[in-house]
Image (spheres, rainbow, N blue to C red):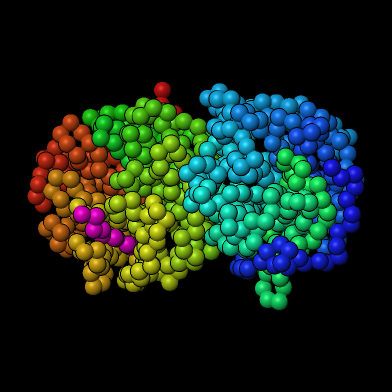
Amino acid sequence: MRTSLPKPWAAVVVGATALGALVTTAAPSQAADTWSCNTTGYILGNDATTTGTLWRYPVTKAGTTSAVIGTRVSIGTGWSPYWVHAGGSGYIWGWKADGTLFAWRYDAATNKMTMAGTQLKGPDGVANVDFGSTSDTSDRLRAVDANNNIFVIDGNGVIMRYKYDFTTKKWPIYREVVDTGFVTTTYDQIWTSDGAAIYARTKTGDLYRFRYDDTSRRLVGSRVKVGGGWQIFKKNFSIGGDVTFAVKPDPGALFHYRHNESAVSPEPSWPVSGDQVGTSGWDDFRTVTGFADACRRTNMVVTNPNVPITQNSPVVAASTSTKKVYLSYVDNIGRLWWGYIPSTADMSPQWTPIHGTTAFAGPPAVVDRGSQKVSVYGHSTTGTVLGKEETTAGGGVPGDFLDHGGAMLGAPTAVDLSTGETVLAATDEQGSVWVRMQYGAAGYGEFRAWEKVAAGVAAPGSHITLADAGNGVARMYVTTAAGAVSTSTYSTSRAKTPWVDLGLPGAGAQGRLSVVTYPGMAQRVFVTDTAGGVHTRRQDTAMNWDAGWSAVDGTTAVAGSASAVIAPNSGLLEVVARNAAGQIVYAQESAQGSGTFNAFKEAIPGDPTVYVADPTPFVYSTDLGQVWGITSYPRPGEVYIYRLSDAANRSAGPVSPTFSVTKSKVHPSK
């Protein structure tokens, strides 16, 4: 071991002969190169194979070509069993060979531990917390960032995220899928930089970088190759701020780098590259790590938008084959309500407020996620998507909130694909479309990070509509800033299709779109224009779109947004809306598949009730088979359900619907 380390070379860039072609591809320009470091950061070296001492090295002027490694001091002995990683806020993480995980907290000012080594077990009491055994090889597939997120590449090439809460002694984040495609036959190391950037190295030395924001759960940008030749290094770690240290074996020299993701010519993408700060001995350590919050990038934080509360937000509905119906909506002061109908015989909802202390913007999304378990996804006024799922299938009792992040201006939409995966989608302040898809591989069942599938294609904050297109494909529909409708697909394999411009419907689209799916997965989309006209287009069996938009009723202007459903027995399309006076109206298709409609009629002729929320049609199961109904409300706190008469339910032809109304007061059910 060394007793002291020399000053680094001044502005030395070691070229391909010594270190390989370290910079081959620059990252795309995204933001100014704004970074900063503490006056002193700390590097830890675990001398596990000899004395078991954990050494601390101060580093000053990190991220510059004048970085200096100072004189080491001992933190303590007894570290021989551990592979050590330093996180943020003084936390030190250590894995034993059997995979058991321990954590300490260290105070650099006093050089003492403020939290003794504590074993952390998994949620189910598993001692190794699901990490498997530890070796030098497996340890390189783990990383801890400044926010004490633990990232692990598992045997399937999935980057998993874990986070432990020392106050509650629980894992609020456990096996969360960050990204896929990092198979260990290709990739052999990852390291992280201040909770925003993740580096992954291939066995052939290619270095890739991508950004992940742990609060919004977004993949910020795609995986980008930022270098080559990194296979010559035995160990790599970061102290934050895109500052990386690399250990070259024999004689164990330590090199210093800083990446600039916003580099544009002539500024280099590595303003600090191959700066040697240690001459030898660094490969003698079992692990070399650094406290990951010593440096930081100040331009890498995703900010949450301020989302106004939607007034008179529509009720959303989902049903299961077990004859249960689920409703949800956000009232005008931001309370999120869960409605459960245990029996479709009387269609009387049991209402539960589930907002807690959070204000929601609305409208939510409700979906049956398979196995008859229903989830609701609310949209907070800070843009965070929060989901609740039933604790037991069909029980009607929602569980705890799961934070899905997002930082979205637009409300989320959800769909459960026929292949079993749930898909969430929303739009941001720039009109970009983001998707968060459940990772359906066996043994996971969690969602991947939000991925941007299109930049600026939608009106900022507008509502996106999703529909199952079959074979693990979700079809997305958006309204553009110009009032046109555009559509694309996204699959479980992350494949995307080009966006198709469906053109401008009438005076231009507004509000929420509605989609119905025919057998064979062809779809028809409905849109309400700014003048109140309702328009539609459909795909044929070859999935080609017809010639243009056609009017549902060329004479009636509706208020808000119309929605459509295929009546289960007749097979006719039913389009429901509010007329200018606020009554619920419907337009029935003249014949199956014709795409032509009769004029709008009042659902209950002569009913003076004025509805303030756009009506939602939905299909549900009863003892007589599947039927359809409508839900809306004349005022927040009093939700109505329109139920068809038995004759209309059983009809296989164009019978005018006859409705009765079930009225429910929205308050906690006894």
Q: Is any atom of residue 378 visible in this view?
A: no
Residue 179 screen position, x and y as percent = 51, 50
Q: Is any atom of residue 647 visible in this view?
A: yes
For residue 391, above or below residue 307: above
Residue at x-position 69% and y-position 49%: 234
Question: Is 526 covered by the magenta stretch?
Answer: yes
For residue 478, above or below residue 80: below
Given residues 35 and 61, the one toward you in this image is 61
Tell me: 280 left or right of 354. right
Residue 54 screen position, x and y as percent = 80, 36
Find the residue positioned furthest to the bottom. Answer: 266
Question: Is 345 covered by the magenta stretch?
Answer: no
Residue at x-position 55% and y-position 25%: 126
- Please tell me whether the stretch drawn in magenta is mainly helix, strand or loop: strand
For residue 364, above or below residue 539: above
Residue at x-position 26% and y-position 72%: 548
Given residues 153 and 553, the one toward you in this image is 153
Tell me: 446 left or right of 81. left
Tell me: 590 left or right of 276. left
Which stretch did the figure color magenta? 520-528
